[in-house]
Amino acid sequence: EIVLTQSPGTLSLSPGERATLSCRASQSVSSSHLAWFQQKPGQAPRLLIYGASSRATGIPDRFSGSGSGTAFTLTISRLEPEDFAVYYCQQYGSSPRTFGQGTKVEIK
Amino acid sequence: QVQLVESGGGLVKPGGSLRLSCAASGFTFSDYYMSWIRQAPGKGLEWVSYISTSSTYTNYADSVKGRFTISRDNAKNSLYLQMNSLRAEDTAVFYCARDRMVRGGIDYWGQGTLVSVSS
């Protein structure tokens, strides 16, 4: 099983600042089959990034993903008020599919 | 637009059973794998199971293998999760999701249905 470790656990930033979230895998993620999801309280997760760097439909270009192998990053270039949420990475290249434990981006 | 609507959640005693349903619309249901993912209260996401387009292939997390069964009815655009021998640790919001597998993974989620296992 591929274990995904996200850091930091909590990121305290102000609107307009840059957010950098990390997701590290215990083994190489095949063909960059890694996704990022955003979840707000009481809501279902929403797909942001798939294939490590491809933005999902309708996702603003301030969200970007990068990385390969065992190290992946989600960057939010300038935080908007609606971006404060919990972010999860997930690998879907091998079974069982696994999620990271999440990074909470909170308002400083 | 893609819509996924779960139902069937509720309160059940340990050892009991429950069947979740997910009604899909806005896309050709039979063209997509489908998955169930759960989230315990205040916790992270846990993948539970997926099923192939024609039900040929299924896969389960070790935590539910032998107790849960995923199925689908393409004629009814519906996904199901039969849950038996429920335990307190199965308490969670269960989400159904459209799954593109290696072509991009999960892209749409339902709003979830809460399953509570308690005596």
Image: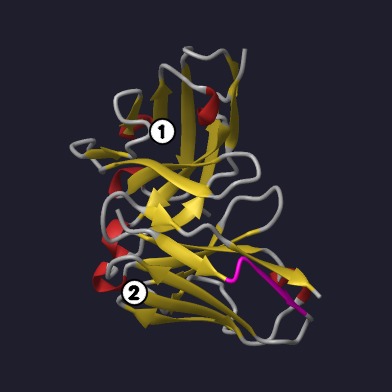
A57 shown above or below B101 = below
Instruction: Give the quadrant of residue B111.
Output: top right
Q: Which mark is residue A53?
A: none
Front-lying residue, B23 or A90:
A90
The residue lying furthest to the left in this view is: B56
Q: Which residue is mark 2?
A: A70
Q: Check disc 1 and give the amino acid type.
A: Ser
Say which chain tag 2 marks: A
Colour mapping used in the image: secondary structure
Q: Nearer the viewer, mark 2 or mark 1?
A: 2
B31 shown above or below A73 = above
Say which chain tag 1 marks: B
Front-lying residue, A48 or B67:
B67
Report the Cα–Cα distance between label 2 and label 1: 36 Å
Q: Which residues are magenta?
A: A8-13
Q: Is residue A90 visible?
A: no
Q: Which residue is mark 1?
A: B78
Q: Locate residue A38, reporting x and y percent.
A: 59, 63
Determine the secondary structure under disc 2.
Answer: loop
A67 shown above or below A25 = below
Q: Quadrant of the C terminus of chain B?
A: top right
Q: Is residue B9 magenta?
A: no
Q: Check disc 2 and give the amino acid type.
A: Thr
Q: Is residue A43 left or right of residue A15?
A: left
Q: Residues within 10 Å of mark 1 (few under 14, many from 20)?
A: many
